[in-house]
Amino acid sequence: MTKDTALRVDNAAWFACGLGLVVAAVLLVAARNIAPPIFDPVGSAALPRACAVALIGTSIGILIEAALRTRRGLTPPVAGRIRPGTVGTFALMTAYLAAMQLGLGFTLSTILFTALAIPLVSHSLRSIPLAIGTALLMGFGGNWVFTSVFFVDLPGFG
């Protein structure tokens, strides 16, 4: 393997990394326009900044993983093959957002989404107890973190 082939990365990884970095840049620029906090210690801009940092890390991770896969001589994943779990997860995400807008609230919508998504992507019924525990933690814990730490107004029930 030559040095040139060791550094080549498939186009999908470059696209995913570039898209992630562009979205992260948009988040960082948008966070600059959020007013500084008056009473809360962290401020509302902390959440989009944290998401941008996580997105930058994920984007770089995608590029590193693709580079390592290429260096080991593994072929990139087959493009155009859509798994049923992917379609199901997209449908669940759409239903999750719709449920929050229609009045189900953040906590209950998050619990339902997480409890259904984990078994869908794991393809195992043994993941149901883990899914229920994770769903309760994400729903109630997420609600607490967003409302008590980040002071974000979340959609409520009703």
Image (cartoon, helix red, strand yellow):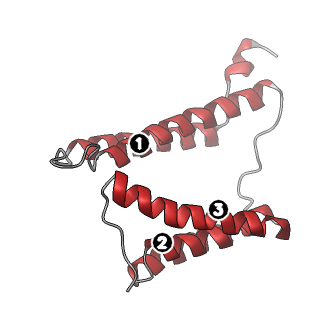
Contact (Cβ within 8 Å) of mark 2 with mark 3 = no
Q: CA distance from mark 2 to mark 1?
A: 21 Å
Q: Is residue 157 shown above or below 113?
A: below
Q: Which mark is residue 142?
A: none
Q: Position of residue 134 (x, y in %)?
A: 64, 62
Contact (Cβ within 8 Å) of mark 3 with mark 1 = no
Q: Is residue 117 left or right of residue 154?
A: right
Identify the secondary structure beneath mark 3.
helix
Q: Residues within 10 Å of mark 1 (few under 14, many from 20)?
A: some
Q: CA distance from mark 2 to mark 3?
A: 13 Å
Q: Position of residue 142 (x, y in %)?
A: 48, 60
In the image, what residue type sits under mark 1? Ala
Which residue in the structure is indicated by mark 2? 107
Q: Nearer the viewer, residue 8 or 31?
A: 31
Which residue in the structure is indicated by mark 1? 50
Q: Position of residue 42 (x, y in %)?
A: 29, 43
Q: Nearer the viewer, residue 70 or 152?
A: 152
Q: CA distance from mark 3 to mark 1?
A: 21 Å
Which residue in the structure is indicated by mark 3? 134
Which quadrant of the view contains residue 74?
top right
